[in-house]
Image (tube, rainbow, N blue to C red):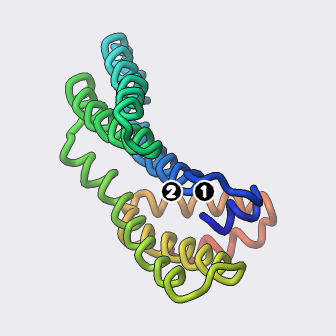
Amino acid sequence: MPFILQLWLKEVPEYTVVFCRLILLATLVNQLSQGIQVGVQSVGRIGGYQVTVSLLLMLNLPVAYALLWLGFEPQSVLVTAAVVEVVTCVYRMLAGRRLMGLNVQEYFQKVIVSAVVPILVAACISSFTLALLPEGWLRLMLTCTVSVLSIIVLMRYLGLTPYELEKMREVMIKAVTKIHPRFAVVLAGRKF
């Protein structure tokens, strides 16, 4: 992140790197429960749910103000945002159970764990390139390559169910068929 920001901004403000990392973390946590939100909205009983989620997310403002007023570092605001996203994610799961019969334990295992574990393992694998190489283009390219490949492999073996793999295969065949029909024949015989 520091190298990319240096290329982009030339003069990187003091807290920019940590702000970007925390915003990415909060966004990733938010995405873990977005499917529940769509499900709750499809049930149609969203009034109380939306009010509670909105109030939880609006907690960011008074808590951030209080932390800054008490003299905490600026990044504490985004740490709070990430924590609020975790709390909101937990609330969405509990509301999903109440409003549409969501099995929270199954959701946690099949969605959250199967998404988080491959990402954490891939991050650990990618950290080797960060530790071994000096900052620069080579490290950036190698880290991106290692990250993408490790996430693909780990998601294939740790994150996706056989049903999801079959659906991905169907989508890939459909996309490749649009490019050239002969490629689809090759893909149709392959197992992913």
**Residue 145 placement, left or right of 124:** right
Residue 31 seen anywhere in this rendered image of the structure = no
**Residue 132 placement, left or right of 77:** right
Q: Is residue 13 above or below residue 188?
A: above
Q: Residues within 10 Å of mark 1 (few under 14, many from 20)?
A: few
Residue 46 seen anywhere in this rendered image of the structure = yes
Q: Residues within 10 Å of mark 2 (few under 14, many from 20)?
A: few
Q: Nearer the viewer, residue 160 or 17?
A: 17
**Residue at mark 2 to residue at mark 1: CA–CA distance:** 6 Å
Direction front: furthest residue: 71
Direction right: furthest residue: 180
Q: Nearer the viewer, residue 100 or 14?
A: 14
**Residue 190 placement, left or right of 162:** right
Direction bottom: furthest residue: 132
Q: Residue 33, position in %: x, y?
A: 38, 39
Which residue has dot 2 on it? 167
Q: Residue 109, position in %: x, y?
A: 25, 54
Q: Is residue 149 above or below residue 51?
A: below
Disc 2 marks a residue whose amino acid type is Lys
Residue lying at 39% horizontally and 45% vertically, measured from the top left: 79
Q: Contact (CB < 8 A) between labels 2 and 1?
A: yes
- On residue 171, which mark appears? 1
Secondary structure under tag 1 reads helix
Q: Residue 127, position in %: x, y?
A: 47, 77
Residue lying at 49% horizontally and 70% vertically, measured from the top left: 151
Residue lying at 40% horizontally and 62% vertically, measured from the top left: 160
Image quadrant where residue 4 sits: bottom right
Residue lying at 51% horizontally and 71% vertically, measured from the top left: 152
In the picture, the quarter occupied by the N terminus is bottom right
Q: Residue 51, position in %: x, y?
A: 36, 14
Disc 1 marks a residue whose amino acid type is Val
Secondary structure under tag 2 reads helix
